[in-house]
Amino acid sequence: MTAPKPAATRPLLLVVDDEPPVLKVIERLAGKAGFDVVTCGSGSEAMKALMRKPADLAMVDLRMPDVNGLDLLRQIRSAVPSCEVILMTAYAAVDSAVEAIKLGAREYLTKPFDFDRLRQVLVEIRVEIERRAHVVALESQVARELEFCGMLGRSPAMQEMFSLIQRLAPHAKVVLLTGETGSGKELAARAFHQSGPRRGRAFVTINCSAVVDTLFESELFGHVRGAFTGAVESKPGVFETAHGGTLFLDEVGELPISVQAKLLRALENGEVQRVGSLQPKRVDVSVIAATNRDLRAEVAAGRFRGDLFYRLNVVEVALPPLRDRREDIPYLTAIFIRDCAQRMKKPISGLTPTAERMLLGARWDGNVRELKNAIERACMITEGTVISERELAGAFTTDAQTAPMRPRTVDPLAARAADAPAALEEVEREHILDVLRQVSGNRMAAAKVLGISRRALYRRLERHGITDDQSGRRPGRRL
């Protein structure tokens, strides 16, 4: 017998109103619209409920005995930035509606409710929440399909690199990987190993930048007992340990000149000699070296041997930085979010649109490693189901945002104009008309009061169909 599929998780709606009949009506209507519902009779009760389980949507009454709805809106948006908020009131006013929009309200509904409109709004928001979760799941699925030996990339640069590795791995015995820090050089090295004839054999890694200068030779080639102070027993080096498999020399550009000649000899002769021993040993290893330095420049400066560089550079594969393959960011992000959510046992399903734009517009000096760390940190501090720009803002370890993505001083209405519901459009129209009447139709003055450019004001006038007669502008006046 086939086990039934688990029911899909329904989005959570938090309703805050001091009138029990209103709570019951919304609970019944929202339940039919596809929400799980939690009802609260006060602002303090609502915040406690929100801390226990973050909501996807909150409906908040404007006037309650213990707290003003606008204040509660601020608290909800601060505590759970991903939570959409609908403000409800029996005392509709343009000023409170405009303030609600500025604070990030999704909708402004008046009582008694237009139930068809309320049902429509709830269904639209529920569909949007589910679509967002579906998109993340789809991106995660596509990302898995695009994965190659632990690496992920849909971009042409990464697809070409995957193809190159597959073609070279069966034949290349010495490979040089170049690329910035965090670009995935070790993953590429493992991909070479897994795609070649030595798969299933040892894959040994040594980070050349983490070895004390005096121990380089011992780490690479091993030593015999008594070879130096502290050598209480014989020990093989990484070349011997990797015999039959692959040796990955990470940050090979950090090797001291004194050791480089011995490494060259090992590569050319296939022999190593332990420190303190006169007996060479044959080793059969495939060597993959990686560096974030420009080794050609290092050779020119005398810090790296030219003969060793040319011996390592039989096959060079350059890994592209993340900023040159931004189309991969959504898929990498989806994988990282899914992995972190599973590991941390959190119901995180994706990002807010603003957070997505932040990731796509970042510099990513630390490349994929920095992106992964940013997502992991954001997942740790996220309380809701969606990561917002607030959680990401402190996750970048560099000045990650490019100029176009930095916060701008704009009219808060403009930030939501693209997706504002019809009710908010009407509120905006009335607010613009009110300002125009106060300044006798002077559009330059109105633009200053609204905090927008005159060109932006013209666009809004056209969108809302506001004429000169309606705005109080005198005929023939050029403003």
Image (cartoon, rainbow, N blue to C red):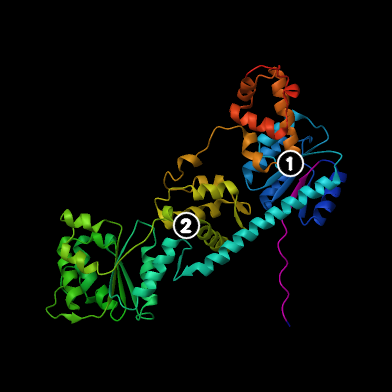
Decide if residue 67 is in sight here.
Answer: no
Q: Is residue 101 left or right of residue 289?
A: right
Establish if 369 lies above or below 92.
below
Q: Residue at x 83, y 52 (%)?
A: 29
Disc 1 marks a residue whose amino acid type is Glu
Q: Position of residue 227 (x, y in %)?
A: 15, 72
> Which residue is situated farthest in the front direction here?
476
Q: Position of residue 64 (x, y in %)?
A: 79, 36
Q: In the rendered view, tell whether residue 434 sits above or below residue 134.
A: above
Residue bearing mark 1: 107
Classify mark 1: helix, strand or loop.
strand
Q: Quadrant of residue 177?
A: bottom left
Q: Are marks 1 and 2 in contact (CB under 8 Å)?
A: no
Looking at the image, which residue is at 19% across and 62% down? 214
Q: Characterize the local packing of mark 2: few (<14), some (14-19) or many (20 or more) Cα atoms within 10 angstroms.
A: some
Residue 12 part of the magenta-drawn span: yes
Give the image quarter of residue 182. Answer: bottom left
Question: Foreground: 321 or 48?
Answer: 321
Instruction: Identify which amino acid the numbered label 2 is placed on.
Output: Lys
Residue 429 lies, with reference to residue 345, above or below; the image says above
Element under label 2? helix
Q: Which residues are magenta?
A: 2-17
Q: Disc 2 designates what residue?
A: 372
Q: Quadrant of the C terminus?
A: top right
